[in-house]
Image (cartoon, rainbow, N blue to C red):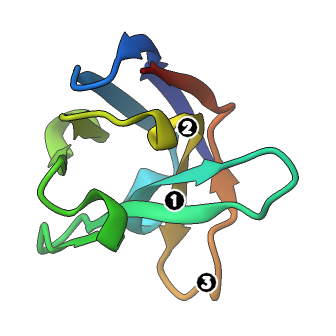
């Protein structure tokens, strides 16, 4: 079992910055990819950014390319998401997820953290 604890988030004006952090515990050796997802009311959860823990290879949704940066700290089993140039449309609940080796989908999730960007 992998446990994920998120921190960061909050409220900021458009153009501002926030940093989200996600600390993993438990069966961390089985994690292949960690990522951040967002969920808007009434909509499905969708990818924001992911990072492969062994290679550091990132993936970004088109909407955040050039503004968000995902990074990892393997020693602390932590992944960060630096969010710059925030826009009101970035407002959502953000979830950290972990994809374990050999698993077909993300099974482990954090509790979610609210990000609110005002215009």
> Mark 1 falls on what kind of element?
strand
Between residue 119 and residue 91, name the one nearer to us.
119
The residue at the point 51 percent across, 59 percent down is 98
Mark 2 Cα within 10 Å, few/some/many (few <14, many 20+)? many
Is residue 116 shown above or below 85? above
Q: Are marks 1 and 2 in contact (CB under 8 Å)?
A: yes
The x, y position of residue 97, in whole percent, is 54, 54
Q: Are marks 2 and 3 in contact (CB under 8 Å)?
A: no
> Which residue is the site of mark 3?
103
The residue at the point 15 percent across, 74 percent down is 57
Observer able to see residue 13: yes
The CA distance from mark 2 to mark 3 is: 17 Å
The CA distance from mark 3 to mark 1 is: 10 Å
The x, y position of residue 88, in whole percent, is 46, 33
Mark 3 Cα within 10 Å, few/some/many (few <14, many 20+)? few
The x, y position of residue 33, in whole percent, is 38, 68
The residue at the point 64 percent across, 79 percent down is 105
> Mark 2 falls on what kind of element?
strand
Is residue 43 shown above or below 61? above
Between residue 93 and residue 52, name the one nearer to us.
93
Label placed on residue 69: none
> Which residue is the site of mark 1?
98
> Which residue is the site of mark 2?
4
Tell me which label, 1 or 2, sits earlier in the chain. Answer: 2
The CA distance from mark 1 to mark 2 is: 8 Å
In the figure, is residue 44 to the left or right of 114?
right
In the figure, is residue 44 to the left or right of 14?
right
> Mark 3 falls on what kind of element?
loop
């Amino acid at each position: 079992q992998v446990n994920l604890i998120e921190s960061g988030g909050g409220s900021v004006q458009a153009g501002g910055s926030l940093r989200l952090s996600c600390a993993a515990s438990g069966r961390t050796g089985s994690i292949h990819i960690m990522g951040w997802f967002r969920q808007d009311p009434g909509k499905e959860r969708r990818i924001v950014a992911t990072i492969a823990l062994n290679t550091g290879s990132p993936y970004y949704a088109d909407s955040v390319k050039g503004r968000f940066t995902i990074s990892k700290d393997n020693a602390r089993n932590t992944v960060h998401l630096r969010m710059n140039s925030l826009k009101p449309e970035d407002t959502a609940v953000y979830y950290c997820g972990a994809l374990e080796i050999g698993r077909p989908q993300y099974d482990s999730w954090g509790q979610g953290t609210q990000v609110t960007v005002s215009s």
